[in-house]
Image (cartoon, grey):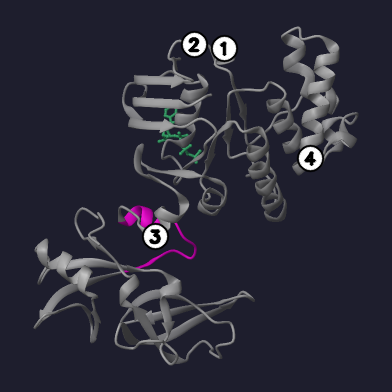
Amino acid sequence: MAGVNLKHVTKKYEGKVVAVADFNLDIEDKEFIIFVGPSGCGKTTTLRMIAGLEEITEGEIYIDGRLVNDVQPKDRDIAMVFQNYALYPHMTVFENMAYSLKLKKIPKNEIKASVYEAAKMLEIEYLLDRKPKALSGGQRQRVALGRAMVRQPKVFLMDEPLSNLDAKLRGQMRTKIIKLHQDLQTTFIYVTHDQIEAMTMGTRIVVMKDGYIQQVDTPQTLYEKPDNLFVAGFIGSPQMNFREVSVDKFGEEVYLKFGKNSIKLPCEKARKLEALGYMGKEVVVGIRPENILDGQTCPDPHTACVVEAGVEVVEMLGSETLLHVKIEGTDFVARVNPKKQVKAGDVIKLALDADKVHIFDKETEKTIT
Ligand code: ATP
């Protein structure tokens, strides 16, 4: 059993640059947790503090219930896989994978069994006699994973392990690592700046920005119920569309108004805005590309706001088409049926699905509803 607990962990470089601020997180045993966020948000620093490669300025880190602040990296029962997997060039794959066990003076037959077991799981048995220079990028990355696996660590730490691979290989390795996690039943902590990688691999995702945790949730919850504008914009590709709008009330109905358009809000969202005193104020509305529907075929025009959109770019992706459009001077991206006949320069009708809009406070950027 190897949970990892971070309590009020802070890292200041040279006493002033706050790289990680008051980080609190309980990672459960066997979890596959992802740290994701833009460059410089503190992901690597957090991982390195868990590994013991970076001193903690404040706070406590526990691995498997044991306080490890002053425990050497080699004694933490963790294994780390980096982006530049740095295999020893003069050693064969077998020797690379066996190295840490050899240092621990494990008997030869046990080393052999461990290396073969890991190699089998990773499907690299046929490479064991090769030197790293005779391997492709993906094969090297698998050897690096194998080298970490043979140590049977309680926790795997991975820092952008796939970022040096091309897109196709990255996809394959992503699946391999998910499978590995299922087979090994060990805690995985994985750093990436790629939200697609985060969404497809993690059981839970920690979204970070400027050293602070923004939200910790499952991929689905992050997508459907982002806590704030940053998370809403960071998770999802293409990203959520945003526009400042004003909140107005006519009779019992509440509308979000921009230009000559009005989005009539469903009852629950309307009452929430009213109760929190947003009438007459400006808010930010967010709408995902798939919630912008075809204005001609939209199922219920009463719950959607039909708008005029000027098509600027049509991106045909096969299974779907992305339309880059301008609506009342704002850029939007809509994900539509690939069968829709449309070209740049057209003016078309699109429908914004009022049930699916997200509404954010303009100042705090927190989600209202
Ligand atoms: P990336 O995706 O670019 O690797 P990251 O989210 O992993 O970014 P960190 O590498 O953890 O971010 O860096 C967090 C912050 O700490 C950044 O502002 C960075 O400039 C700063 N930082 C990192 N290492 C040091 C250091 N050794 N000395 C001073 N500042 C540092």
Q: How far apart are marks 4 and 2 (CA)?
A: 33 Å
Residue 287: which quarter of the image? bottom left
Q: How far apart are marks 4 and 3 (CA)?
A: 36 Å
User: Which quadrant would the C terminus be assigned to in this image?
Assistant: bottom left
In primary-sequence order, the first of circles 4 and 2 is 2
Residue 243: which quarter of the image? bottom left
Q: Name the residue under label 1.
A: 75
Magenta span covers which residues?
Answer: 229-242
* In the rendered image, the vertical position of residue 239 relative to residue 246, given as above or below: above
Residue 272 image position (x, y, % from top left): 17, 64
Asked if one can make out residue 90 in the rendered structure from this viewpoint, the answer is no
The local secondary structure at tag 1 comes to helix
Residue 285: which quarter of the image? bottom left
Q: Name the residue under label 3.
A: 224
Asked whether the residues under the numbered discs 3 and 2 touch, taking CB atoms below 8 Å apart as contact, a structural biologist would say: no
Question: Identity of the amino acid at label 3?
Answer: Glu
Question: Identity of the amino acid at label 2?
Answer: Val
Select label 1 or label 3 by which is in front: 3
Q: Name the residue under label 2.
A: 71
The local secondary structure at tag 4 comes to helix
Ligand 1 is found in the corner quadrant, namely top left
In primary-sequence order, the first of circles 4 and 3 is 4
Q: Name the residue under label 4.
A: 139
The residue depicted at 84 percent of the width and 20 percent of the height is 112
Q: In the image, is 8 to the left or to the right of 169?
A: left
In primary-sequence order, the first of circles 3 and 2 is 2
